[in-house]
Amino acid sequence: MELINENIKKTNYPTASTLADRLRIEIPNILNIWEMWVRKEVEAARELHPTDLKNSLPKVLENLAQALEFQEKGVLPEIKVAREHGKERSTFPKYTLEQIIAEYRLLRRAIFEVIGKDVTDQERDTIIDAIEIGISESASEYTKQQFLFREQFVSMLAHDLRNPLSAAKISAQLIQRAPEITGTTLSIAGRIVNTIERTDNLIKDLLDSNLVQMGQKIPLNIKECNLKQLLKTTIDDATSVYGDHFVLEIDSNVTIGFWDPVILQRAIGNLLTNAIKYGAPKSPVKITIAQKDPKVIIAVHNDGKSISEKDQAGLFDNFYRTIGAKDGLNIGWGIGLFLVKGAALAHGGAVSVKSQENIGTTFTLTIPIDCRNNQEDSVGVQKIKEGVMSTVLSENK
C-alpha cells in the first residue's frame, strides 16, 4: 500500500516525550491517513460522513496510549471502547465483519506509518496486541448486534404473519361449520385449515429455534398426557399429509405421563416428517414406544440411505442440512431436528441418532415420564420471551 508522504504532517516532539505522548499528539494525523486508506480499501466506508467513519476510533487510540503507559507494569488495559465501534458499524447495512477487521488492520498500518520505526520491540508488541484486542472486541459486538437484529426481525415477522393466518383459519372453520356447505367445498375448507395449521407450526418452529439458539429453553405447559393418544393423533396428522406410511408399536406399560403435549407432538411430528423426506419411499416408518422407568423412549426408524458420521455430528445444529439433503430435491430449513433437541432438553431429556448402511436410521427421543420439575424454568423463559416481544413491538409502532 502506497502512502502519499505529504499527507503526513511532520511533528517536532519534545526530547523527553514518551511514545504514548507522541501517539496522543499524532491522533489527528493517524486518523487522516487512516481515513484516506479506508475510503480506498473498504467499500462501505466511502459513503460515510467523516464523523461517522471515525466514530469511536479517537477513544481507541487514547486507550492505546494508555496501554503504552502501562506496558512497563505488564498490564494491557482492555480496549472495550472498541465495542462502540462494532456496535455503530452494525447499524450500517453495507458493513460486513470482514470490513470491520480491515479497518483495524489499516489503523495499525497508519499508526506505524505515522510514528515511524523508532519503537522498541516491547512497544511494537503492545501496539499489535492492543489492535488485536480491538479487532476482537469490535467484531464480537458487531456479531452480537447482528444476532439481536435477526431475533427482532424474526419475532416481528412471525407476529405479522400469524395474525392474517389466524383470520384465514377462522374463516375456513366457519365454512366447515355452515350446515349448507357439503361435498367439495367442505373438503377444500378442510385442506385450507390443515395448510394454515402446518404454516403456523413452521412459524412456531422458527420462533422456538431462535429461542434455543439464544441459549434459552423452550417454554413448557406441562399437563397430564395419554402418550398413546398423543402418538396416534400425531401419526394421524402425518398420515393426512404423507399417506399411510407409519407403523406404531407401543409397550403396554406406557400410558400416562406429564409433558407439554403441544411441544412433544411437534417434536415427534418433525421426526416423522424427517423420516418420510429422507427414508426409502416404499418402506414404512416404524415408531416404537417403550417405558424404562423413570423415562419413556420414543424411537422413529426409517429404511434407506444412511447418514454419514460427519453429518451425524452436526445433525442437531440449527439450520444444518446434510450433504445428501442439499443435493436432493427435498426443501427444508434445517431447523426440525434442532427443535427436537430443544424439546428434549426442555423436558429434561435427550435425542440421539443411529444410522448404518443396510439397516437404516433411528432417531431416539428419551424424556422423563414426569417433567413437572421443568415447568418452573419454562415459566421464567416465557416471561423473558414475552418481554422481548413486547419491547420489539412497542419500539416499532
Image (cartoon, rainbow, N blue to C red):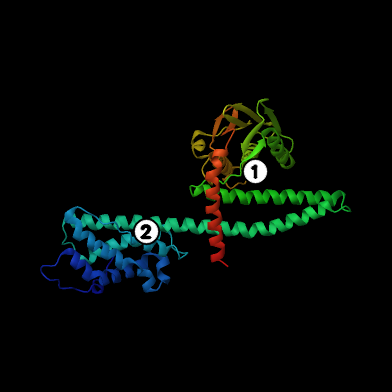
Can see residue 30? Answer: yes
Q: Quadrant of the C terminus?
A: bottom right
Q: Amino acid at mark 2?
A: Ser
Crowdedness near tag 1: few (<14), some (14–19) or many (≥20) residues, C-alpha within 10 Å: few
Spatial CA distance of label 2 from label 1 is 41 Å
Q: Position of residue 191 (x, y in %)?
A: 76, 49
Residue 263, image quadrant: top right
Q: Secondary structure at mark 1?
A: helix
Can see residue 320? Answer: no
Q: Position of residue 109 (x, y in %)?
A: 27, 62
User: In screen coordinates, is 20 left or right of 352?
Assistant: left
Across the whole image, how many numbered discs are drawn on residues?
A: 2
Residue furthest toward the right? 180
Compare marks 2 and 1 and give the one earlier in the sequence: 2
When the figure is inspected, residue 266 is found, relative to residue 227, above or below; the finding is below
Residue 33, image quadrant: bottom left
Q: Position of residue 317 (x, y in %)?
A: 51, 43
Q: Which residue is mark 1?
A: 262
Residue occupying the point 53% across, 59% down = 152
User: In screen coordinates, is 336 left or right of 285?
Assistant: left
Q: Secondary structure at mark 2?
A: helix
- Which of 238/39 is in front? 238
Residue occupying the point 33% across, 67% down = 37
When the figure is inspected, residue 385 is found, relative to residue 280, above or below; the finding is below
Q: Amino acid at mark 1?
A: Val
Q: Which residue is mark 2?
A: 138
- Which of 182/222 is in front? 222
User: In screen coordinates, is 71 left or right of 84?
Assistant: left
Crowdedness near tag 2: few (<14), some (14–19) or many (≥20) residues, C-alpha within 10 Å: many
Residue occupying the point 58% across, 48% down = 333
When the figure is inspected, residue 290 is found, relative to residue 203, above or below; the finding is above
Q: Quadrant of the N terminus?
A: bottom left
